[in-house]
Image: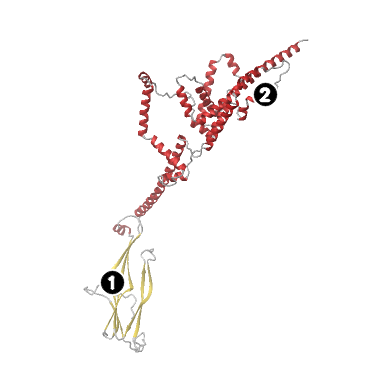
Amino acid sequence: MYIRINSEIQIGGTQSSTLFQFIDLSVSECQNNSTNQWKPICREQDQHTFKIKLLTVNQIINPYKSKESYVQPFIDDSFSFSFNINLTKSINAFITKFDFLNDESLLPIRQVELTIKFSMIEEKSFYVLDPTDVQQDYTERIDDSFVKLLFRKKPFKTRFQRQYQKIDELLSNIGGILQIFSFFIGLLVTIYNRINCIFYLTLDMVELGNKLYDFSIDDSDQKKIYHDNLQILVETQTSGLNAQDSQIYQKMQQAIIADNEIRITDSQTQPLKQDQRLSTKLCCSSGLDYFQTQLQKMFQKKKPINLDFQIFFNFISCGMLFSKIPKVQLMNKAYDQIIQQSDIYSLLTRLNEIDKLKEVLLSPKQLVMFNFTPKPLITLEEEDLKINRNMVENQLKTPQDNKEEMLVYTRMMMKQKRQNKIGMNHESIRKKKRSSFIPQPLNNYVYQQIYNAYEEIVKRKPGSSSETLNSQLISMLGAELELIYQVCQKIDQDVRPFAKYHQKLKSSLSQKRSLIKQDLEKQNDSP
């Protein structure tokens, strides 16, 4: 069968339609007829099975590809059918129509306006013969036809609307992507902030617990300091140092300095060396020196609980992990005490107890005067340095002095210097101008103030009204610190006579030198 070029064949409708158009191809018995242009050559009919094959121009449609390649024509040779010459085979092949509406605009404008104003809407139709959409049937021989092939139009068509992504949709998608991205970033930041908050909360609780409490994990070093000081006191009591104090003063009075020669013999200093063996043994020059050394050792031996993974995981697991470890148990106990003491009920209870304590200690008249005392005054003048236990511990942890504490200390020393100058006469001021004001280091000042405060409290008379309060204060310092103070007192008792003797000897030496100098001047003046 040949179809002329540029010829049109219309198909459409169904069997129930008033207009039913289709293409009917029949395969009949071959005849050797030389009059035909294609001059057929028939095969022998002893072969009962024959095959028909159609070559059509078909199209591959992929609406998701670009404009140039979403429809690709090709020669389709997949239509082949076998038939028997004793039967008639009916074949219905359906042609499917594909309508495409291509919108090439990017602006969010309606299709009617685009078609009228901009002509950016393109409509195209394509027909595809699908080899899978074929119906085959065998009937008895009809009209000497072996095959009846009907090409019909499928009653259903497929419509595609292809368009570029509009600007508003693009912005909406970008906004959605940014929103999703922001959600995940916010989720990660929230998780990080939560973990960071828990970590710093645990760190603050550990630091607060170390500042408020001392933990007894391994107190072997503290016990060693206590036993060493106790042994020193026992040795000093058995050696009878107190009985030798009177002998020291007698031997100092028997010291003789020659008129023409200044000489200190070994027999004169030997008793002092024997009496000073305690300070020499302990390698300290005074009780304050020994007190500072022992206090530094005592604070350095203390072992605070540092934050580690065991305490952190125990905190975030609500006490489920590492709950049997001693340091974790101690820190949890410190947590409970901090929470209990910071509770509003506990604070109000303590305030009520303070009011009750004022009523017990003070008379009604004294209570009126106490309540009438003025509020704390904040001024621009220099304040005194407030010494406490945390200051000493912080100075041991950091080698450099705190800038704020050092500034307050320097201002306090300068203020004290100005007050001393006001009370001096002009002669003393003239003498003091030669020496510059060099204050002692801050840590030495702190230890000296603590040591002087203890000495002043101990030296109070037994019958004073503050005796009970002083004894309670000393007992609250602890047995370890009390032993250190007692050893310091023993050292001061041994060093003080030697210091007086050395000062007296120094003054006598200076007097003797001045006399020798005067004699030499007289000899030089005489002819």
Q: Indicate the position of residue 78 as horizontal and vertical percent values.
A: 37, 76
Tell me the mark number nearer the camera, choosing from 2 and 1: 2
N-terminal-most mark, 2 or 1: 1
In the rendering, at what x and y percent does residue 279 appear? 61, 27
- Callout 1 amino acid: Lys
Residue at 69 percent of width and 22 percent of height? 267
Q: Is residue 451 left or right of residue 170?
A: right
Residue at horizontal 41%, vertical 48%? 188
| Residue placed under numbered mark 1 in the picture | 154
SS at mark 2 in the image = helix
Task: For the residues labelled 2 and 1, say whether their Cβ atoms are less than 8 Å apart.
Answer: no
Tell me which amino acid carries mark 2: Gln
Placement of 37 over or under 458, stated as above or below: below
Q: How many marks?
A: 2
In this view, the residue in front, 498 or 137, is 498
Question: Most extreme residue toward the right, as rendered?
Answer: 527
How crowded pointer 2 is (Cα within 10 Å; few <14, some 14-19, many 20+) is rated as: few
Residue picked out by circle 2: 270
Q: How is the image coloured?
A: secondary structure
